[in-house]
Amino acid sequence: MDKVIGFIGTGNMGAAIIKGLLDTGFASPGNIVASRRNQLALDKLKSESGIQTTSNNTLVASKADILFIAVKPNVYESIIEEVRTFIKADAVIVNIAAGKSIHFIEDTFQKPVKVARAMPNTPALVGEGMIGICFNEEMEKTEREYIVELFSSIGKVEVVAESLLDAVVGVSGSSPAILYMIIEAMADGAVKSGMPRQQAYTFAAQAMLGSAKMVLETGIHPGELKDQVCSPGGTTIEAVTKAEETGLRSSILAAVEAAVAKSVEMTKES
Ligand SMILES: NC(=O)c1ccc[n+]([C@@H]2O[C@H](COP(=O)([O-])OP(=O)(O)OC[C@H]3O[C@@H](n4cnc5c(N)ncnc54)[C@H](OP(=O)(O)O)[C@@H]3O)[C@@H](O)[C@H]2O)c1
């Protein structure tokens, strides 16, 4: 029998994962049950996706073989307290919150539980997420494989040590915001040179997408790819010089480091 996949919370991330599971056929609507408080939003989700919806979190917990807790980190504790006596004995709890360790989840459930801790990002909405994931000792090999396959429906998955999840927050969880800022800034540059804005976004975003694919698909070092584009005395080396003069690399490195530091701080507080 197919597993029942439950979601408590269906905001940006919960909804993105549900969409991926349905779009790829990993799960059928009848195998997904989801809750949130806003009834109008639940009705909309039900009519658009055909999944089962409810405002009753404990109902989701009691049905789910795989239980996603997809609420904001500050309500994690109260949600776990609400549902902890209702979960199935062998349910897998999927924790996607920034700053909530496996240890925190185990402690809050107050009993041995199977925990997968994942850090996805919002490009999951278009099937291009990047997901770092780790597991606790309770999770068996086949269960780990199932969860990796599940997340593969919304993007690329890498199993990492839990100690690396703060770095994952910086490099892929939070970084889409920085990348959107770069696209916006590149488009501003093109608009300044006379290109219509919508067209400028297309050029900038496709340039970023293509460059990312070059890194992933050729396996060539990004520095070498950069060198390949810089003709002596050409336009690109002018752009590279200006980017270096204005601190592009150090600015981005510092932004990623700041997100990592915040994630470390949030984990310590929980
Ligand atoms: N967004 C990202 O880029 C991103 C990336 C990686 C990880 N995450 C993690 O994903 C989690 C969710 O983030 P998000 O961006 O999806 O947040 P979000 O859009 O604010 O969604 C939160 C969801 O939780 C529901 N909720 C709140 N209180 C609830 C309750 N008591 N019972 C049931 N549902 C409740 C909300 O619906 P109602 O208000 O209707 O209850 C909403 O559907 C967070 O822990 C975050 O750290 C997010």
Image: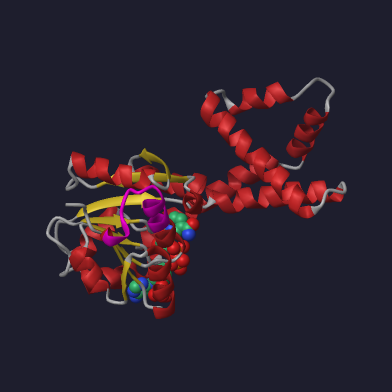
**Which residue corresponds to the image point at 33% horizontal and 64% vertical from the top-left?**
51
**Which residue corresponds to the image point at 22% horizontal and 61% vertical from the top-left?**
64
Q: List the single residue furthest toward the left.
A: 89
Q: Position of residue 174 (x, y in %)?
A: 52, 52
In the image, taking residue 243 as reference, residue 31 lies left or right, namely: left
Q: Main secondary structure of the magenta part?
A: helix
Q: Position of residue 74 (x, y in %)?
A: 39, 69
Viewer-proximal residue among 97 and 163? 97
Q: Is residue 241 visible?
A: yes
The colour scheme of the drawn protein is secondary structure
In the image, taking residue 48 as reference, residue 134 lies left or right, namely: left
In the image, taking residue 54 as reference, residue 14 lies left or right, namely: right
**If the image is split into quadrants, where does the C terminus sit?**
bottom left
In the image, taking residue 124 as reference, residue 200 lies left or right, namely: right
Q: Is residue 249 visible?
A: no
Residue 8 image-quadrant placement? bottom left
Q: Position of residue 86 (x, y in %)?
A: 16, 69
Q: Magenta region: which residues? A: 17-30
Viewer-proximal residue among 265 and 75? 75
Is residue 19 within the magenta segment? yes
Q: Is residue 107 above or below residue 141?
A: below
**Which residue corresponds to the image point at 78% horizontal and 51% vertical from the top-left?**
188
Viewer-proximal residue among 9 and 236? 9
Q: Position of residue 261 (x, y in %)?
A: 48, 52
